[in-house]
Amino acid sequence: MKRTFATAGAVACLAMAAGMAMAQDMTVGFSQIGSESGWRAAETTVTQQEAETRGIDLKFADAQQKQENQIKAIRGFIAQGVDAILIAPVVATGWDAVLEEAKEAEIPVVLLDRQIEAPEELYLTAVTSDQVYEGKVAGDWLVGEVGDADCNVVELQGTTGSSPAINRKAGFEQALEGHDNIRITRSQTGDFTRTKGKEVMESFIKAEGGGANICAVYAHNDDMAVGAIQAIKEAGLNPGTDIKIVSIDAVPDIFLAMAEGEANATVELTPNMAGPAFDALAAFIADGTEPPKWIQTESKLYTQADDPQAVYEAKKDLGY
Amino acid sequence: MIRARNLPFAATVLIFIIAYALCVMQFPNMLSTRVVGNLLTDNAFLGIAAVGMTFVILSGGIDLSVGSVIAFTSVFIAVTVRAGMHPAMAFALALVISTAFGALMGLTIHALSMPPFVVTLAGMFLARGAAFLLTTESVPISHPFLDTLGDLFFRLPGKGRLTFLAMLMLAVFVIGAIIAKRTRFGANVYALGGSPQSAELMGVPVRATTIRLYALSGALAGLAGIAYTLYTSAGYSLATVGMELDAIAAVVVGGTLLTGGAGLVMGTLFGVLIQGLIQTYIVFDGTLSSWWTKIVVGLLLFAFIVLQRVILLFHGPKGKPARMVPAGG
């Protein structure tokens, strides 16, 4: 009796395994940091969608913000014999040993979203955005928008000392160089949050003659921009026309604001890091094509002319 | 013949074997030396800390500082090695500090007759704070000595590796089991957990035992910190937050009585391995949320607490069935 059961189980397993092998030609393990932000959740959703459209069997492991969980997951993927591994690394250090194991097992590794401090030969490539460039795209938009008119900009910075805050500030300032009519008059941290963004904007408006001296707001992320829009409305001004709003990330809520004419532009930090990673992997596995060590994702600019309502509809179910 | 007190241990081993068999039925790949090697290596730091926790819980106490001490040790080693100290020296210093820290907590618990829960909670904040004081960033460590330790492994047939960390953990378990069963200190710990009053009347040196106990837990947390440092080759002050709870779960699932006095060090090994097995299964499946680890561990914990209560009611010296009758009822 026991034996019959075991045999039946084994046969079922074999049949399932055979079926899977036929339907999918590539198995990829994905070690995600966690789901601490809306963007992170969207990245997970998009990765799963991208895998599905390519017929890739995606093994997903959520590390709950812990490096040891990520290392365990990667070891598990190696033991399982996956064809490739994607990692969104939680910290920059401490990956050498486990990546060496992957290399020894001849499993290519692609980093998503963040770089690490490890010898380059340990991973195939890294797919990340360029944060300085994101700031520059936002700045370039403002330069084109105001032309020769004078413009006082207030800046809502990200968390003090965080790399996106430093880089997005630097990129924006790069874009303003040589355009003396545009000046950043005030700059403070809004901690990347909606409430802090609103608070800081309220104080900016009070300090700048009820908002009369502010021509534009540059926020390091959309959440702070949404908070600033609220503050501007409460001060009796029209966001988007009286005060222009430009921010970074392209989360669904900013598209709603753009559709209503309350925000002007946003630069997308794409959650689709996996698409370029899968393409690079497919080429590498097919004929050994080595991708460049860094694949920069597109930092696309969205304005009110880009049918924000439609973009909102497309993005709202991604888990943001 | 299995004694009733050891029934939870037998249950743990049985659960582990059945669970592994079920996993292998679904994923034949899981029956490989690679997976077994990973189970031991990936859980080495948890296992080492859990041995210390086993002693503490056997005595009826608890040590909440373990996770923070591990983080402190890893940051301390990273910072001192970065400053130019030899890793072996840094390891020794870290062990001295963590042992002294544990001993100090033991002394406080005894001298102030404070609940271990409160004192080690303070210890938890202290150690974590000290780690942040050293550095808030993740500090990488690279030193030929660490590479040598990392390369120190036996190849098992079938690509698996018995790493230095795995061997270290197994050694700690064996030594821990010997201390628990074959030394005066071990007997004192069991006596203390059975009943502190009668232990004192029997002439158990409560003060010395308590201090040694928490010193041992501190030392093993320090050793776990060294293992963690070798594992990630970095020190990070936010590492292993809440790991003491995983260690407590491993001890209880391993069959040790949460109220103290009964349990086996080797049971904890299986408690650790069961947690590792659940994580491995989730990675192999690749679609389950990793939070299922916590849910399954929670259910197992609950089941074991119920099992312990039932055994105590029918066999334990403290819990006669008569206690079930409500007072005044």
Image: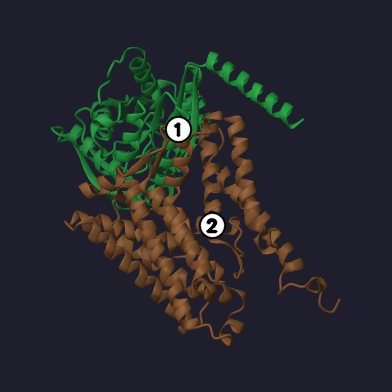
Chain colours: A green, B brown
Please name whichever residue, B120 or A277, is drawn nearer the observer in this view of the structure. Answer: B120
Residue lying at the far right of the rendered structure: B329
Please name whichever residue, B224 or B199, is drawn nearer the observer in this view of the structure. Answer: B199
Q: Is residue A229 visible?
A: no
Mark drawn on residue B309: none
Looking at the image, residue B307 lies above or below residue A195: below
Q: Residues within 10 Å of mark 1 (few under 14, many from 20)?
A: many
Residue B48: x and y in percent read: 44, 57
The chain letter under disc 1 is A
Please name whichever residue, B77 or A239, is drawn nearer the observer in this view of the structure. Answer: B77
Q: Is residue A57 visible?
A: yes
The structure residue drawn at horizontal position 22% and vertical position 27%, both measured from the top left corner, is A147
Quarter in which the N terminus of chain A is drawn:
top right
Looking at the image, residue B329 lies above or below residue B22: below
Nearest-to-viewer mark from 1 and 2: 2
The structure residue drawn at horizontal position 34% and vertical position 56%, both measured from the top left corner, is B226
Q: Is residue A108 left or right of residue B139?
A: right
Q: Is residue B116 left or right of residue A121?
A: right
CB under 8 Å between discs 1 and 2: no
Q: How many marks?
A: 2
Q: Amino acid at mark 2?
A: Met
The residue that mark 1 highlights is A79
The structure residue drawn at horizontal position 49% and vertical position 83%, both measured from the top left corner, is B205
The chain letter under disc 2 is B
Residue A195: x and y in percent read: 43, 49
The structure residue drawn at horizontal position 59% and vertical position 59%, both measured from the top left corner, is B252
Residue B272: x and y in percent read: 52, 51
Q: Residues within 10 Å of mark 2 (few under 14, many from 20)?
A: many
The residue that mark 2 highlights is B266
